[in-house]
Image (tube, grey):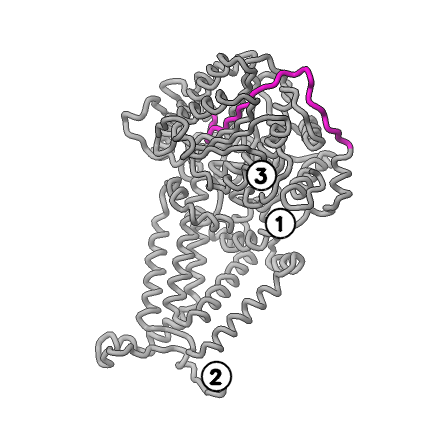
Amino acid sequence: MPILCKGVVISMPDLLMPAAPAGEAVSSPLARIRGTRVLIGLGWLSTPFFPLFCLFVMDYMNFGGHLTVQFTFWERHPRSALFEVVVVLLLFAVLTLILRRLWISGLIFGLLSLIAAYVNYTKAALNGDHLYPQDLAMVTQAKELTSFISGDTPVWFWLGVAAVLLWVGWFWLFRIALLRPFFWRWSTAALIILAVYLSVNTTTKTERVLNRFGMSTIDSALQSSNYAANGFVGAFTINVLSMQVQPPAGYSQDTIQSILEPYQAVAADPDAQVFDVVVVLSESFFDPRILPGVSFSENPLDNYDRLLDDPNSYSGLIYTTALGGGTVRPEFALLTGLTTDYMPDVTTPYWYVDHAFPTYVSNYKDAGYTTLAVHPYDKKFYARNTAYPLLGFDEFYGQEEVAELVEPTYKRSYISDDTTFQAIRTLVDSQEDPVFLFAITMENHQPFNALDAEDIHIQVDCPAMSEASLTALTTYTQGLYDADQMLGSLADWIDIREKPTVLLFFGDHLPTLGSNFSAYDETGFVDASGNQTTEDRQLLYSTPFIIYSNRELEGGLLEEHTGNQISDYNLLNSLARSTGMARTPYMELLADFYQNVPFYNNRLLLPLSQEDTFFPQAMEQITYDRVLGEGWSN
């Protein structure tokens, strides 16, 4: 069928251009193969199936390499699957129109698809998170990110890689390409891009398009269900369309004022002692002795147990929004009192922080404290280097600064917890003003690969565990022992200090422990298949905390010395009350939330009464107002 293009009649075969390059003999075997019209036609007819195959690989990896789960997705969510098909076909069409040669567009599209599939699978297997659009901004930190990679890759993925490369080779061999005219191709691509843009350039239009496929931007609030219900491409596209955080319903100055109006600021207790405050986020700290059927040749948490019984300590469980990774989310909540529940489930909320707003850190700074942060890793990771000053920190010590303070030692390529302790002690003891210091450890970060025999001091046994899971738990336990030694060193140091000092030591999230959290599933601790009950989620999203002081301490929000339960965003609020610090109206609102609902986040799927829904809605309003809005609550 002829096509009229700028007054020139072009037949359909002219769309395909197997012309031999200069210098290639027309009669050569390669030229004869390239001139085979049937093979050229088959290559051209296979073109739309190429992006669909790439989509198949991406979703195969998105569903953990389980074809049955992938088929179930197609059966239960056919409109989401259709949406994915439309997206990949449009993307590949635009890329091919711009580049003309299918082997080039196929190579780029195929490689990007394979990389996305691999990273998404690996990230989900390691920490339960998926590949998000914001992760692309961390490409400059690829070296640091690859240090966390571990785990097996489904063998069928590598067959998919081979198939994509062979397919691209087919496109190259027969030099399948579109029309030569530049204007025709680029104008068509521009029209497609414009049509898509005009379809989603407002929130209303975006929702209308997604709703036609049974999808919604609201799906981005909980990424586990987003990627399960919409597939990788569908979920990733929703996240792209949701990156611009929209104001919560009813957001206005009057709304903010009405939320905070019932709460009054509380002045500092003039008779209270002035405490140095040390807060340690211990990487992946939790008590593995709660795993059914697991035994240890030696107690890995001897100091933790000792301090639990101390009358100057308070302990319990802190509920966070991270599992296996994503330290920055509970870190953000702990330091600010805000929530990431109603932001896009990004890798780091710090990318949204571009101005100062009230935090627990700034509350200490306003009270005359020197505010310090310590993290023996790359300061740019998770954009901490730009966010921390805006949160209220005076100084931030990364791995280079820590190495200048003390002689560093390393465990599994990370700066050891003992080194971090020495840096904390050096910094706090050198200050004349009261100190608020926040530290994040690195030693017991994943991956938990097998150790040499001489590095294993505590043997771990569990008949129900696979070899891979037991290896991960064994490696983790050695680091946990060192974290416990750090806790003991901190307590001993605090005991000999003359200044009143209080320590908050807690874990940010449970460790991964095997691909797809296999250790938890194999021991029967929880159902790790994704069909968790509310009770399962409470186990998965809680870690231990302990507060210890060299002075008698009030409990703050905590009513008992042990067995307390509290959310990450309220922990420093409780500590402020314990030490007689000044408190803001927002801190009083959070305290009221605690009295009604001691712990809550949207990952726990906890039912709330109609009356109690006020509190998470209020947190959504205040979080938006301070981070992205007008700052009326400041």
Q: Is residue 94 visible?
A: yes
Relative to 634, is 479 on the left or the right? left
Q: Amino acid at mark 1?
A: Val
Identify which residue is drawn at 58% across, 34% down.
392
Circle 3 residues within 10 Å: few <14, some 14–19, many ≥20: many
Circle 1 residues within 10 Å: few <14, some 14–19, many ≥20: some
Circle 1/circle 3 CB separation < 8 Å: no
Residue 446 against residue 299 in the figure, above or below: below
Circle 1/circle 2 CB separation < 8 Å: no
Dividing the picture into quarters, in which one does residue 105 lie? bottom left
The Cα–Cα distance between marks 1 and 2, rounded to whole angstroms, is 45 Å
Q: Which circle's residue, 1 or 3, is located before the other in the chain?
A: 1
Q: Which circle's residue, 1 or 2, is located before the other in the chain?
A: 2
- Report how many numbered discs are placed on residues in the image: 3
Q: Is residue 464 visible?
A: no
The Cα–Cα distance between marks 1 and 3, rounded to whole angstroms, is 20 Å
Label ID, residue 552: none
The Cα–Cα distance between marks 3 and 2, rounded to whole angstroms, is 60 Å
Dividing the picture into quarters, in which one does residue 516 lie? top left
Determine which residue is flagged by label 1: 245
Question: Comparing marks 1 and 3, which lies closer to the viewer?
Answer: 3
Circle 2 residues within 10 Å: few <14, some 14–19, many ≥20: few
Region of the chain picked out in magenta, as a range: 262-286
Residue 203 against residue 370 in the figure, above or below: below
Determine which residue is flagged by label 3: 390
- The image position of residue 317, as x and y in percent, is 56, 25
Q: Nearer the viewer, residue 191 or 77?
A: 191
Identify which residue is drawn at 40% across, 60% down.
110
Determine which residue is flagged by label 2: 3
- The image position of residue 525, as x and y in percent, is 48, 30
Question: Comparing marks 3 and 2, which lies closer to the viewer?
Answer: 3
